[in-house]
Image: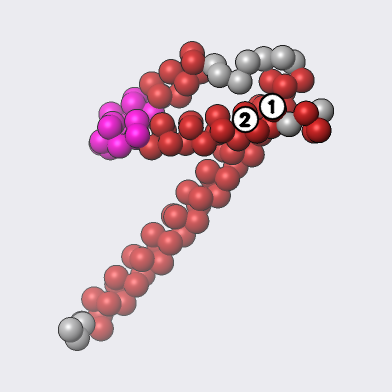
Amino acid sequence: MAGNGAGEDGLETLRASLDRIDESLLDTLRRRIECCVEIAHFKREHNVPMMQPHRIGIVQRRAARYAQDHGIDPDFLRRLYELVIAETCRVEDLVIGDVAAR
């Protein structure tokens, strides 16, 4: 299907913008995980339990407020944060359990 040149240029510009946003999102997720590694080191050094349910609740409530304030589906952000939290807990478990790194 042949496309309209001007429309395709506009679409490519929008896609390039989306690609930059995606890169920023991925960089932010990487930085979040790196921060969680630092937190895990602190927890290990100070014998703080990895799981902090009250903190998870704070993060989830903040995401729910953000969703409400910005017109984003709160269920989407809840599911997204469940994935992000699960991964950071997995990473923290690895760091806290790494006896060789002590």
Magenta range: 62-79
Neighbour class for label 2 at 10 Å: few (<14), some, many (≥20)?
many
Q: Answer with left or right where residue 11 lies relative to residue 57.
A: left
Check disc 1 and report the residue beneath it. Answer: 96
For the point 43% across and 61% down, the residue is 19
Q: Contact (CB < 8 A) between labels 2 and 1?
A: yes
Q: List the single residue furthest toward the bottom.
A: 2
Q: Is residue 38 visible?
A: no
Q: Main secondary structure of the magenta part?
A: helix
- What amino acid type should be assigned to the residue bearing mark 1? Ile
Q: Is residue 75 depicted above or below 17 in this figure?
A: above
Q: Position of residue 57 (x, y in %)?
A: 43, 18
State the residue in front, 97 or 8: 97
Q: Answer with left or right where residue 31 lies relative to residue 60.
A: right
Check disc 2 and report the residue beneath it. Answer: 92
Q: Is residue 102 visible?
A: yes
- What amino acid type should be assigned to the residue bearing mark 2? Glu
Residue 75 is covered by the magenta coloring: yes
Q: Position of residue 45 (x, y in %)?
A: 77, 20
Q: Answer with left or right where residue 49 lies relative to residue 44.
A: left
For the point 50% across and 56% down, the residue is 23
**Tally of marks:** 2
Residue 80 is covered by the magenta coloring: no
In the picture, which quadrant includes the N terminus?
Answer: bottom left
- The secondary structure type at the circle numbered 2 is helix
Neighbour class for label 1 at 10 Å: few (<14), some, many (≥20)?
many
Q: Is residue 73 depicted above or below 14 in this figure?
A: above
Please tell me the numbered disc located at residue 29. Answer: none
State the residue in front, 76 or 7: 76
Q: Answer with left or right where residue 3 lies relative to residue 93.
A: left
